[in-house]
Image (cartoon, helix red, strand yellow):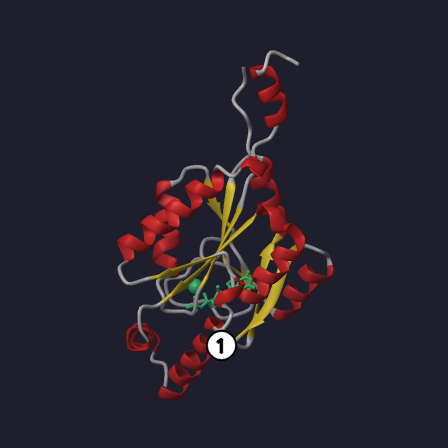
Amino acid sequence: MKPLRRRGLMYVMSSPSGAGKTTITRALLKNNEDLTISISTTTRKRRAGEVHGQDYYFATPDEFRDLVDNGEMLEHAKVFDNYYGTPRAPVEEALANGKDVIFDIDWQGTQQLAELAREDLVTVFILPPARAELEKRLRARSKDTLESETEIRGRMAKASDEMSHYSEYDYVIINNNVDEAIKKAQLILDAERLKRHRAMGLSDFVRGLKGGL
Ligand SMILES: Nc1nc2c(ncn2[C@@H]2O[C@H](COP(=O)(O)OP(=O)(O)O)[C@@H](O)[C@H]2O)c(=O)[nH]1
Ligand SMILES: [Mg+2]
């Protein structure tokens, strides 16, 4: 008997910036061979250390608009003052090859994916343990980019805005401790992979177990 195949799932991680989402996502990718990340396209400026095609695909606003107009984006949204979107083809290809796909997208993108494929979607919202901690992480990060106080205030306001959408998600992880948060994200993935509706050919399989009747 062939092993049962499973529908690939779309695993969405959202959080305000500075909640530890990138660390958690990277750990999951490292620990799960059959998981692949969706690399987004954005019009925002490339930061030092970011690699085109690895962190993001960087595009001009005109290029971005063309991609949207040609139906090449699965979802897209304006975040801060920039556009972000999920290229459609790599996601469809990964799912067709039986892989699960992880997404680092905001609440707007999550809502759009839910409209397209709610059954295949698993959504997790990551919260920082405390406001002071969030501010500390944003400040530490801004040292690299010499952000002004106004910009940091702006990021805190944006974080509040993003966090107000936590209740639209299936799961919430409070990131008190990153190793614990990674474990929780893995548990969710493992349990969701076992959902009955993701198994293909289950009724035939059970019919066989019952002796073909
Ligand atoms: N809707 C949507 N949001 C995205 C996409 N890619 C990234 N984002 C979100 O855009 C926000 C800003 O991301 P980024 O510019 O990397 O800054 P960060 O806050 O330091 O991670 C984050 O909330 C991401 O989750 C995308 O393809 N679609
Ligand atoms: Mg990011």
Q: Which residue is mark 1?
A: 161
Q: Nearer the viewer, residue 11 or 168?
A: 168
Which residue is at the far top? Answer: 211
Residue 195 in the image: above or below residue 51: above
Q: Residue at x 47, y 44 (%)?
A: 36
The image quarter in which residue 109 lies: bottom right
Q: Residue at x 54, y 18 (%)?
A: 2
Q: How many numbered tags mark residues here?
A: 1
Q: Nearer the viewer, residue 84 or 60?
A: 84
The image quarter in which residue 141 lies: bottom left
Q: Nearer the viewer, residue 64 or 105?
A: 105
Viewed as shown, does residue 62 lie left or right of 36? right
Viewed as shown, does residue 131 lie left or right of 95? left
Identity, as a three-letter code, of the amino acid under mark 1: Asp
Residue 87 in the image: above or below residue 209: below
Viewed as shown, does residue 114 lie left or right of 153? right
Q: Residues within 10 Å of mark 1 (few under 14, many from 20)?
A: few
| Mark 1 residue element | helix
Residue 24 in picture, x, y percent from top left: 36, 54
Residue 171 in picture, x, y percent from top left: 45, 56
Q: Residue at x 40, y 80 (%)?
A: 156
The N terminus, quarter of image: top right
Disc 1, ligand 1: is the CB inside 8 Å? no
Q: Nearer the viewer, residue 1 or 23?
A: 1
The C terminus, quarter of image: top right
The image quarter in which residue 107 lies: bottom right
